[in-house]
Amino acid sequence: MSLNAGHPTPKSVHSLQIADATLSWRNLDDAEERVSTHEILFTIDFSTAQRPNYIVYVLREDADAQSQPFHLDLLQTDEIPGELRHGHLLNGIPPHLQPTPSNKVDVIVSTKSGTGRAQSFWQAALQPLLQSASSQPVVEQYNLVVTQDAQSVRQYAKTIDGPPSATRTIILLSGDGGVADLLNGREPVPDAPLPLMALLPLGTGNALFHSLHKPCATTPGPTPLVLALRTLFLGAAANLPVFEAKFTPGSHMVTHADADGSQAALQLPHRRQVSSLYGAIVASHGFHASIVYESDTPTYRVHGAKRFGMVAQELLKLSHPYKAALDVRPPSAVKFERDAHETHGYILVSMVSNLESNFTISPASKPLDGKLHLVHFGAVSGDRAMEAMMKAYDGGKHVDVKWDDGERVRYEEVGGVRIVSDEDDERWRVFCVDGTIVQVARGGGMSVARASRELLRVLVDASCVVDGRGTA
């Protein structure tokens, strides 16, 4: 499907001023309007030798407006205040967003991500933004992919590697699951440029986006979607660090999605054999994996991010001790070391700092640093587990938690981790890789280490990148 090449009509304004974090202007009828400067995306200079011409782009969001949660303002003027000249000012649409025979630009709208806002964001904000920013008629159209089921992104990913000389930008309106599908659905072509991904956070936790943009996030400040659109136009490309999780024979991915999308099929889990998965966020076993597994049903998904807390409360009542062997390989080491615990509560290997915007699972992680960190504690009571998790909402202070009996939260950088389950009940033999659930056979398990190759590039704020790598 192609993007319509029509252009939205900007409104003419004058007397733009910025004061007290507020942008004000006057319309043609001289009525004054104003928005927070945090809602300003950027300004594009369309001036010619004959006359000055600027368009200021503003995104307004209203979560309570179910039918129209997004509104894009296009303010056309012949003069802008100095603050806008020295801020986010462009001279046109950047090359990575220009569809040409040698540069493909794809837009993926994941209709079921999060609470289902991707379609309305595309129609009300991103589509008119791309159309307006393209000052010339677009001959080579943007390719629009609207997901039809849980397999749509993976199916798309199989098609994206074309001739070695062609580049590709993928604008992904999704959550972390969409990233996982891109990583695991691709069939790379040797010597072909890595696809460039621009992530617009419309999922539930949006862990990768929040972690990559943590240095830019302020309170008060721009919303995640404002930050994302700024990065889309003004960001820099960097290789996305990924890890590989390998599973023992007899392991299966478990989902509650079916190709036909029927409600009857959605209620039952579906299984598919798997030997390995790539990830960019976390791999886990224990409490975290069980939360993701048991909340990933149609009944819980309608609650958005609240579903995790709902399931967590039930699991905390059980405080199940996960029987497993945990082996840890320190950075730069060859040998694994066995953890002393025979039962565990929480085992998580993270490549990012945050699982949600305010849930800091790995405070030492920096955007793009490519380092793996282990967060672990043994089979503790529900009260202790809750204490540790709540401190993660306080800037990651859970990593310092110690209890009187010597039990503590173990937190350290690792080179690799190996986990072997010894559970009889398959309910507790689940592992999570970036939201994908894998169930292993009795005595089966997972090993995690940094992947040996790069799979995607990602757009991030320019302050996070030095020569294509993280600033760490």
Image (tube, rainbow, N blue to C red):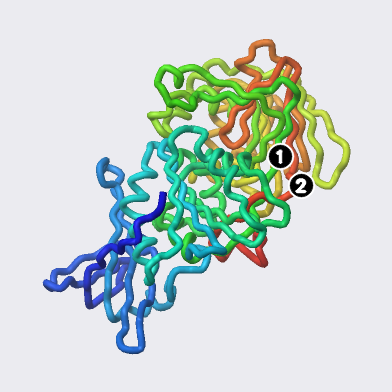
Residue 202 vertical placement versus 53 (above, below)? above
In the picture, measured across the screen, residue 127 lies left or right of residue 411, that is: left
Q: In this view, does 3 lie to the left or right of 361?
A: left
State whether residue 345 appears in this view: no
Q: Which residue lies furthest to the top in this view?
A: 424
Residue at (64, 31) in percent of width and height: 284
**Residue drawn at (71%, 48%) of the image:** 371
Q: Residues within 10 Å of mark 1 (few under 14, many from 20)?
A: many
Left/right placement of residue 125 relative to residue 27 reads right
Residue hosting label 1: 244
Residue 264, image x, y percentages: 42, 17
Residue 126: image location, x then y, percent = 38, 55
Q: Which residue is drawn at 29% across and 68% down?
A: 23
Label 2 – label 1 distance at C-alpha: 8 Å
Label 2: which secondary element: loop
Which mark identifies residue 396? none
Q: Identity of the amino acid at label 2?
A: Ser
Position of the C terminus by quadrant: bottom right
- On the question of residue 432 being in view, the answer is yes
Instruction: Identify the residue position indicated by label 2 in the image.
Output: 452
* N-term mark: 2 or 1: 1
Is residue 139 toward the left or the right of residue 289 in the image? left
Pointers 2 and 1 in contact (CB under 8 A)?
yes
Residue 120 placed where, x, y %?
33, 46
Label 2 crowd bin: few (<14), some (14–19), many (20+), radius 10 Å: few
